[in-house]
Amino acid sequence: MRATFFVIGYLAEANPDLVRQELRLRMTVGNHSYNHSQVPPFAQLPPQLLSDEIALGEQVLSQLSAQPRLFRPPGGSTAPRLVRAAAALGQQVVLWSVDPADWRPGSSAKEITKRVLSAVRPGSIVILHDGGGDRSATLAALPAIVRASGGAVLHLVALTADLRTAQGATGNP
């Protein structure tokens, strides 16, 4: 099974072996900025800072042998100038279509699973978090999500720079 991890630059610096392990397992590693700035919303950062955040995140990941071609802005904050800034650095902005709010304190594995499975459809992009607090409920939810998604209709795949295709796709939608 493959997945896509959008990695924050300063956390990649602090945990390089984790990024290397994702790459060894043939996961897609995307850029999630260097600092994960959210105040002001990421897309409202001054133009040079916006470009620097994207470029620094890419630089750190490149030093770890990742070649990020996908960028997910913190908080999903986007605007045309952010899309242009990412494109100028060879990265495509990717958001999500299913947010089970696993980041919300007190979310249980059962709630996260239910939120994903009630909203996911072929072509959905599900956002799950591995940082920013206690993620034990997210980890506990994954086996049920994977089991339920492994049927004939839905297949878990990693994103690629060409979003019309995906690594690990079986030919089904």
Image (cartoon, rainbow, N blue to C red):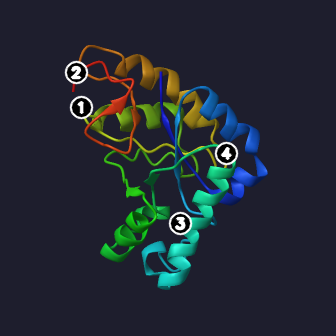
10 Å crowding of disc 1: few (<14), some (14-19), many (20+): few
Q: Residue at label 1?
A: 122
Q: Residue at label 3?
A: 54
10 Å crowding of disc 4: few (<14), some (14-19), many (20+): some
Q: Secondary structure at mark 2?
A: loop
Observer-side mark, 1 or 3, equals 3
Disc on the earlier residue, 4 or 2: 4
Disc on the earlier residue, 3 or 4: 3
- Answer whether residue 15 is visible to the viewer in this image: yes
In the rendered image, the vertical position of residue 22 relative to residue 130, given as above or below: above
Q: Residue at label 2?
A: 172
**Residues under labels 1 and 3: Cα distance?**
29 Å
Q: Is residue 152 left or right of residue 81?
A: left
**Residues under labels 1 and 4: Cα distance?**
29 Å
Q: Position of residue 148 (x, y in %)?
A: 37, 19
Tell me which amino acid carries mark 2.
Asn
Residue depicted at x 48% and y 73%: 42
Q: Residue at label 4?
A: 134
10 Å crowding of disc 3: few (<14), some (14-19), many (20+): many
Residue 18 figure quarter = top right
The quarter in which the C terminus is drawn is top left
Residue depicted at x 46% and y 37%: 112
Q: Are marks 1 and 4 in contact (CB under 8 Å)?
A: no
**Residues under labels 3 and 2: Cα distance?**
33 Å
Tell me which amino acid carries mark 3.
Ile
Disc on the earlier residue, 1 or 3: 3
**Residues under labels 2 and 1: Cα distance?**
9 Å
